Image: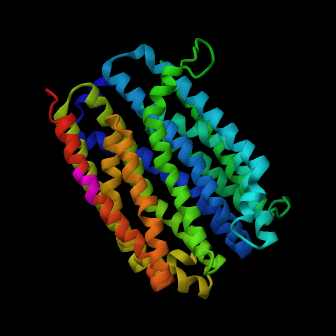
Amino acid sequence: MENKMGTMPMKKLLATMSLPIMLSMLIQACYNIVDSMFVARYSQEALAAVSLAFPIQMLIIAVSVGTAVGVNSLLSRRLGEGRMEEVNQAAQHGILLALISAAVFAVFGLSAARAFANLFTTSADIASQAALYIGIVTVFCFGVFVQIVMERIMQATGNAVYNMVMQGIGALVNIILDPILIFGFFGFPAMGILGAAIATVSGQILAMVLGAWIIHKQIPFIHLGVKGFSFSWDICRQIYSVGFPAIIMQSVASVMTLGMNMILLPYSELAISVYSVYAKLQQFIFMPVLGMNSALIAIVGYNFGAQKKQRINQAARYSLIAAVLIMALGTVLFQLAPKWLLGMFNASEEMLAIGIPALKTISLSFVFAGVSIVLCSIFQALDDGMLSLWVSLGRQLILVLPLAWLLSQWGGLNVLWLAFVISEGLCMLFSIGAYRRVKLRQIDVLAD
């Protein structure tokens, strides 16, 4: 582990650690997008219901990923410092915190799902379907919580390749079950949106079980059971010193979606569906960068603990190049094929009229976002999670929502989408300036 993280050529290390998690995160994105594609063919009301549930699913992912980022960062630093006795305790606390968080969402799903849905629609049918979907995915969200923490445990210990196996099998189960349960094949009744929810949580729970088995077999110094566990508030504090800002950073995407829904609601519920479809499509562009950055956190965290300045600089440079290339390709796709992308969701002519300008305009911000995301990951790895948080708040909340509202008042729906380009561009410039200061203060002073 130490030789690999501290000595392997950086391009190869980034590739071997990033590609499995990139693929696993792309597979994770399949859960939402596959549900939406199938339910769109079931009914437009079902698509609207899944769209209303999307911010809650984003929030679940935000809390689980944020907790896992904290576990990843702590594990990587302890491994780099050679403090092996603390590695297992960090992993056990990560699983416990995941289960506690899942329980909180389950309570919300049981008590407030319908009230939440009623905020964004006047249709009783859509609200009822949304509440049903939210209830299922929250009550059984322990699967995705534990699964994501396990992914980061594997990644921090140099076993990220198993993420792809775990995620792939879970997603395959979801893809197989979706049409069977939604439309009623092979003797099953047609369950519509309920079937989509059951398919989603079934895949997640299976992936969790598989992940536990992989860790047990492949990472012998990690023991996830209660044997030898000793609860420590200090370990929780260390996990959330990085994890909590990451949770907030991830959660602002959910808050942004809620805010955008409120801004778009006066236009039509179809505009909300278009934005939800865009958010799911752009995951396939952003997830590879986010997956690479998860590996970047582990690599930079390890080499910072090991005082290897040159390797930190190499990791930052190669990650920025890769992120810009990925985002540029995504921009080209959204510019050239927006009608095809929307067609995957059975888009009507009215939906295309709203969606094509939206996809073409927002995608102009992708490269700016890629640079900011990479630099935020470096801030997290250096235990400067608050700086990462402020950049994320600027990108997805502080700037974009006021700009979207102002532009909607001034130029209407098509002009509104420019808010994404403006906010991402400004935040990229801020991130570059902040990175230069962090590099001077924390990286350049290392002995190496």
Q: Is residue 161 magenta?
A: no
Camera-side residue of 400 and 321: 400
In the foreground, 292 or 209: 292
Which quadrant: the C terminus?
top left
- Could you tell me which residue is drawn at 53 percent across and 21 percent down? 233
Q: 163 and 350: which one is in front?
A: 350
Q: Quadrant of residue 84?
A: top left
Residue drawn at point x = 66 percent, y = 47 percent: 203
| The magenta segment | 429-433
Q: Compared with residue 104, is residue 234 higher up or lower down, i.e. above or below? A: above
Residue 33 vertical placement versus 356 (above, below): above
Q: Residue at x 24, y 45 (%)?
A: 316
Q: Quadrant of residue 327?
A: bottom left
Check the image and report above or below for 149 versus 389.
above
Q: Residue at x 15, y 35 (%)?
A: 444
Give the quadrant of residue 241: top left
Q: Can see residue 192?
A: no
On the image, the x and y values in percent for residue 223 come to: 55, 19
Q: Magenta span: helix, strand or loop, mainly?
A: helix
Residue 83 position, x and y percent, is 37, 16
Q: Is residue 390 left or right of residue 339?
A: left
Vertical order, 352 against 288 (above or below): below
